[in-house]
Image (tube, helix red, strand yellow):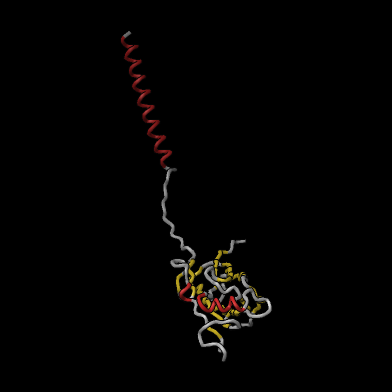
Amino acid sequence: MQKIIKNRKFRLLLACLSLLLLIDMMQDSFAKYVSTAEANGNFTIARWAFMVNQQDVLNNSDFSTTIIPTFDADQNIATGVIAPTSTGYFDVTIDSTNVGVAYDEEISLSNGTNSTVTDLIFTGYKLNNGNTISFQNSTNPSFTISHSLNEQNRVNTYRFFIEWRDGQGENMNNSADTQASKNGSAAVKINLRFIQRASS
């Protein structure tokens, strides 16, 4: 009887040792096929930085102080001021040198919210001294220009032509023109929107 018990203990001990040996062998076997890897990838982000009249408009979107109107010489109107029948222009230079994507440029013009002169009209514009594109004497023209990624010219100057309409089609009569000269305000508003063009 004692021999049988010892024999069972021996077999149990042998079975436990065999099990431990088997587990150890399985771990060694599976460990040969386990590996890890880790890496950090750095990607260059496309730049998106516009300068308008030499001002960074992403940091300061109001470029009002950079708009300087020039009025055409007229023997009946003092230099540097606007009056009925005055014509002139102002320039807006957009520098997209630091833009790394194709984009659309939306430009809209209108009378300023504080302008009491409602007869200011935009007659057209020219891009980089090219041909003048007419607005048909519009008070609020808008247009879009698409720019591709491989454009050579990244600095574009728009010259916008304005006029104080007097006579046919005017909104203000002579009395309103006179009142505007006393305490009025002539102002225009320029809105620029830059929109990344989606990949096709």
> Residue 17: horizontal and vertical position, in percent?
35, 26
Nearer the observer, 71 or 177: 177
Assign the N terminus to one quadrant of the image. top left
Residue lying farthest bottom?
75
Rendered-image quadrant of the C terminus:
bottom right
Question: Residue 118, percent across and down?
Answer: 59, 73
Outermost residue, top side: 1
Say which of 26 and 84 sits in front. 84
Tell me what residue is drawn at x 41 percent, y 55 percent: 40
* Residue 189 visible in rendering: no
User: As displayed, is residue 5 above or below residue 119?
Assistant: above
- Residue 23's image quarter? top left
Instruction: Report the side of 100 relative to 170 (left or right).
Output: left
Residue 71 occupies quadrant: bottom right
Picture layout, residue 130 above or below residue 35 = below
User: Can you see residue 10?
Assistant: yes
Residue at (54, 76) in percent of width and height? 180
* Image position, residue 27 (x, y; %): 40, 36
Q: Residue at x 53, y 76 (%)?
A: 92
Left or right of 52, for residue 172 = right
Viewer-proximal residue among 108 and 187:
187
Measuring from the top left, give residue 29's x and y in whole percent: 42, 38
The residue under the point 59% across, 69% down is 108
When asked about the image quadrant of residue 121, the answer is: bottom right
Number of numbered callouts drawn: 0
